[in-house]
Amino acid sequence: MRIIAGSAKGHSLKVPREVSRPTTDRVRESVFGILTAVIPNARVLDLYAGSGALGIEALSRGGASCTFVEQNRGACRVIAENLNKTGSKEGRVIQRDVGAFLNSEKTSYDLIFADPPYADGLRDPARDLIAIEGWEQWLAKDGFLILEREAAGELPDPKELVLVQSRDYGRSRIAIYQLES
């Protein structure tokens, strides 16, 4: 896995053993192609951060800052290593459950990346995340929530968000939301 563009272009990233399905270069390239105009100076939140690849890519392309939220301690160490390796100084790593983080978070972000684990038959973390109320406090007025989930199955229509675009890449679906106006 590598950074595709920007100041850290070409740097390879370490992937934690605990991350079973990192976002592929192809998917990241497509997502960042769509978001090119909003990345410079963006405040970014990377939920279920894993290796930190999405947030670090945003920083490399001119994002102002990124908060990485990841529950796994080993993955948090890898994110910190990847930030150091790429020279990204505007990253903050928080080891915490995403739901608990959002319940206490009062900051709004221009871009929120969320790549929760895929549904396992008992739980569907993407469905749970999108159903949370309070997106208007976390997502800036013209901001975007970019959710990666399994392509099979549909998400419920969240009360506060509008689906702007959805694309499938093999087993993955990228859904881009904005606040309802």
Image: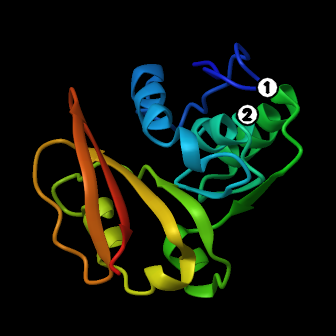
Check disc 1 and give the amino acid type. Answer: Ser
How are the colours assigned in the image?
A: rainbow
| Residue 106 vertical placement versus 54 (above, below) | below
As rendered, which of 120 and 84 lies closer to the eye? 84
Q: Judging from the image, what secondary structure is the residue with disc 1 in?
A: loop
Q: Position of residue 41 (x, y in %)?
A: 74, 52
Q: Who's the residue at 33% across and 78% down the image?
A: 180
Residue ranking furthest to the left: 153
Check disc 2 and give the amino acid type. Answer: Ser
As rendered, which of 7 and 150 lies closer to the eye? 7
Residue 22 seen in the current view: no
User: Would you name the residue on which mark 1 appears?
Assistant: 7
The N terminus - image quarter:
top right
> Going from the N terminus, do you reach mark 2 or mark 1 first?
1
Determine the image quadrant of residue 86.
Answer: top right
- The answer to whether residue 20 is left or right of residue 162 is right
Q: Who's the residue at 32% across and 62% down the image?
A: 125
Q: Count neighbours of disc 2 (C-alpha within 10 A) and say few if under 14, some if 14 to 19, many if 20 or more.
A: many
Residue 40 seen in the current view: yes
The C terminus - image quarter:
bottom left
| Residue 24 vertical placement versus 69 (above, below) | above
User: Would you name the residue on which mark 2 appears?
Assistant: 60
Q: Position of residue 23 (x, y in %)?
A: 44, 32
| Residue 73 vertical placement versus 51 (above, below) | below
Residue ranking furthest to the top: 10
Q: Count neighbours of disc 1 (C-alpha within 10 A) and say few if under 14, some if 14 to 19, many if 20 or more.
A: some
* Circle 2/circle 1 CB separation < 8 Å: yes
Q: Position of residue 31 (x, y in %)?
A: 43, 36
- The answer to whether residue 94 is left or right of residue 86 is left
